[in-house]
Amino acid sequence: MNLLQARAVIEALIFAAPEPIGVPQLCELTGLTRHTVQQILADLSEDYQKGHRGLQMIEVAKGYQICTHPYCAPYVEKLQKNPRSTGLSQAAMETLAIIAYKQPITRAEIEVLRGVRVDSALNTLLEKDLIREAGRKDTPGRPILYGTTR
């Protein structure tokens, strides 16, 4: 592999690694010498610093890691707080499955099927725009009917 390919491979390995990856492991994975890997790491680090990018390469715990640049933190935090970008609890998943299968369905009917209160799960699903109010049931109290949005 040529130097440009080696550089791309090392960058990809650092990006994909679940934790900081050290020079010995990079040498082992790429078959490159320690000197070559260290030179590529220095070049990559310099490029990230000079490029005014949203990412940076840092040395942590005797390894290297690609992470977001601190000046991008407020924007990344907004993304992480976005309800659509986070997963669902087991209770919310079960509630969503019931609604998808039995829609339109009332909160009380869901609670009978699940055997527990579902207020929190319904609120979560409504916030994430995964379910919607599909009308009212024509019974005393006119309870809300829920259905999926897609």
Image (cartoon, rainbow, N blue to C red):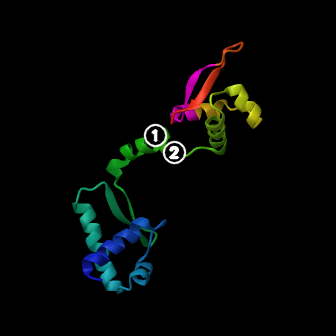
Disc 1 secondary structure class: loop
Which residue is drawn at the image coordinates 32% and 85% (left, top)?
A: 35
Q: Is 115 contained in the magenta span? A: no
Percent coordinates x, y for residue 145 in the rendering: 62, 24
Residue 142 drawn above or below residue 43: above
Quarter holding residue 66: bottom left
Say the numbered circle drawn on residue 82.
1
Secondary element at tag 2: loop
**Quadrant location, the N terminus:** bottom left
Q: Which mark is residue 119?
A: none
Looking at the rendering, the stretch of residues picked out in magenta corresponds to 125-136
Residue ranking furthest to the top: 140
**Residue type of the residue flagged with mark 1:** Asn
Residue shown at the point (39%, 47%) measured from the top left:
76
Kindly identify the residue that appears in the image at 62 percent across and 28 percent down: 104
Question: From what the image shows, is residue 35 above or below residue 82?
Answer: below
Of residues 32 and 105, the one nearer the viewer is 105
Disc 2 + disc 1, Cβ < 8 Å: yes
Of residues 70 and 143, the one nearer the viewer is 143
Residue 36: x percent and y percent? 30, 83
- How packed mark 1 is, by other alpha carbons closer than 10 Å (few <14, some 14-19, many 20 or more), is few
Q: Is residue 27 above or below residue 95?
A: below
Q: Is residue 129 part of the magenta span, yes or no?
A: yes
Q: Amino acid at mark 2?
A: Thr
Figure quadrant of residue 8 = bottom left
Location of mark 2 (residue): 86
Q: Left of 112 or right of it: where is 93?
A: left
Number of other residues with Cα within 10 Å of mark 2, as a class: few under 14, some 14 to 19, many 20 or more: few
Q: Position of residue 85 (x, y in %)?
A: 47, 44
